[in-house]
Image (tube, rainbow, N blue to C red):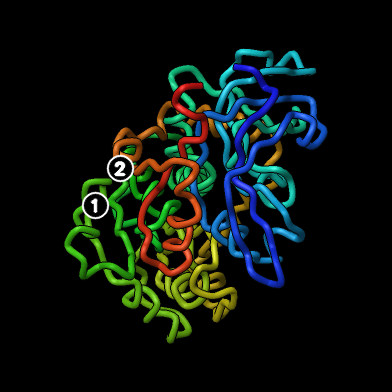
């Protein structure tokens, strides 16, 4: 394919009103960088929806091309570690936030943002995971290192995952289950039969309403219920999870869809030795990023995740992104960026 012209989703602001449309560009429009990638697939994330909506905490200025995930093939490279023809994934750092993102048939990025895809993991499959799956993998790895320092069978007892209906939460459920843990999925859709069945199919042994987890936040410390926890929500759900964690339990924190405030006491930490870990998927050093993707392609890989995603075209992104913002969207969505005839 000639790179003389290509398509990208561009967001514009006009008198405070945001609008997005497909436009054509040339490689000269792209920012500087050592690696030019032909993007085959991206994925739709909450940050992308915020960028499309004009959220200044995500994107400072417009016009802008969002897309915090991208997977495809290297076209040009000044770095021998990622030569032309190599399948790669790019996510995190500033991609799609204030730098030209993955909702574009081509991106140009620094070489140290690029992860060569491990053998057996194609670009489309990588985007079934994307930033959400990578974040889930960081959380699951942290919990697994604490609970199984020498390997072996997973210990008895439930690991709770909040926001289990979302991208990070649903993948964490599948990964933990695949490692042998008993998983309790916490969701605001616990009364929805389809949502419950989806989480059960991903490996959850129990599905509970998120308010049942948040209720423990009202106490200084609660009865220990969890051997570990993955929180994607913050606020009273994370507080309840920590206060009901068992002795030495690891709990990871990677999101704030509920609230940025955290009503905790010191009791879970000084009486039970609960361990609270912050998870950052944006600025992870590239060596660690490449190592974790190796695990996503092997022992953390769950085919149930890949089969449970939906796929949309680049043109459909603005409409589907609205569903993410109003809470009607569930699960993972892959974005088909490359035109089929290309």
Task: Decide if residue 56 is in sight here.
Answer: yes
Quadrant hosting residue 152? top left
Task: Decide if residue 227 is in sight here.
Answer: no
Q: Secondary structure under badge 2?
A: loop
Quadrant hosting residue 188? bottom left
> Which circle marks residue 198 in the picture?
1
Contact, CB < 8 Å: mark 2 with mark 1?
A: yes
Q: Is residue 39 above or below residue 265?
A: above
Residue pictured at 66% horizontal, 47% vertical: 65
User: Is 254 positioned to the left or the right of 159 in the image?
Assistant: right
Earlier in the chain: of badge 2 and badge 1, it is 1
Q: Is residue 20 above or below residue 76?
A: below
User: Is 306 positioned to the left or the right of 282 in the image?
Assistant: left
Image position, residue 175 (x, y; %): 38, 42
Q: Is residue 288 above or below residue 195?
A: above
The residue to which callout 2 is attached is 308
Residue pictured at 43% horizontal, 75% vertical: 240
Image position, residue 329 (x, y; %): 38, 59
Q: Secondary structure under badge 1?
A: helix
Residue pictured at 54% horizontal, 75% vertical: 259
Q: Nearer the viewer, residue 160 or 117?
A: 117
Q: Is residue 47 above or below residue 217?
A: above
User: Is 188 positioned to the left or the right of 253 in the image?
Assistant: left
């Amino acid at each position: 394919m000639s790179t003389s012209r290509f398509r990208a989703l561009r967001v514009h602001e006009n008198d405070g009103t945001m609008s997005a449309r497909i436009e054509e560009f040339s490689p000269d429009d792209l920012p500087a960088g050592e690696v030019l990638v032909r993007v085959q697939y991206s994925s739709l994330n909450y940050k992308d929806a915020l960028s499309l909506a004009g959220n200044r905490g995500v994107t400072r200025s417009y016009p802008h091309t969002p897309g915090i995930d991208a997977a495809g093939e290297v076209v040009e490279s000044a770095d021998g570690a990622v030569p032309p023809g190599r399948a790669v994934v790019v996510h995190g750092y500033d991609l799609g936030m204030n730098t030209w993102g993955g909702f574009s048939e081509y991106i140009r990025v620094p070489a140290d943002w690029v992860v060569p895809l491990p053998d057996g993991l194609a670009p489309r499959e990588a985007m079934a995971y994307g930033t959400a799956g990578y974040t889930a993998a960081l959380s699951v790895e942290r919990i697994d290192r604490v609970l199984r320092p020498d390997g072996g069978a997973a210990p008895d007892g439930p690991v709770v995952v909040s926001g289990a209906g979302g991208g990070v939460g649903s993948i964490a459920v599948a990964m933990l289950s695949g490692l042998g843990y008993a998983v309790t999925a916490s969701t605001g859709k616990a009364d929805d039969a389809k949502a419950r069945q989806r989480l059960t199919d991903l490996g959850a042994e129990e599905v509970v309403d998120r308010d049942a987890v948040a209720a423990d936040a009202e106490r200084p410390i609660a009865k220990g219920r969890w051997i570990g926890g993955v929180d994607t929500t913050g606020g009273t759900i994370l507080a309840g999870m920590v206060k009901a964690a068992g002795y030495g339990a690891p709990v990871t924190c990677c999101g704030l869809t509920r609230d940025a405030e955290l009503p905790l006491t010191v009791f879970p930490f000084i009486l039970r030795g609960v361990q609270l870990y912050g998870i950052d998927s944006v600025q992870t050093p590239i060596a660690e990023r490449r190592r974790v993707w190796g695990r996503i392609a092997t022992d953390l890989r769950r085919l149930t995740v890949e089969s449970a995603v939906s796929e949309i075209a680049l043109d459909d992104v603005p409409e589907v992104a609205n569903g993410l913002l109003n809470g009607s969207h569930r699960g993972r969505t892959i974005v088909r960026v490359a035109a089929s005839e290309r």
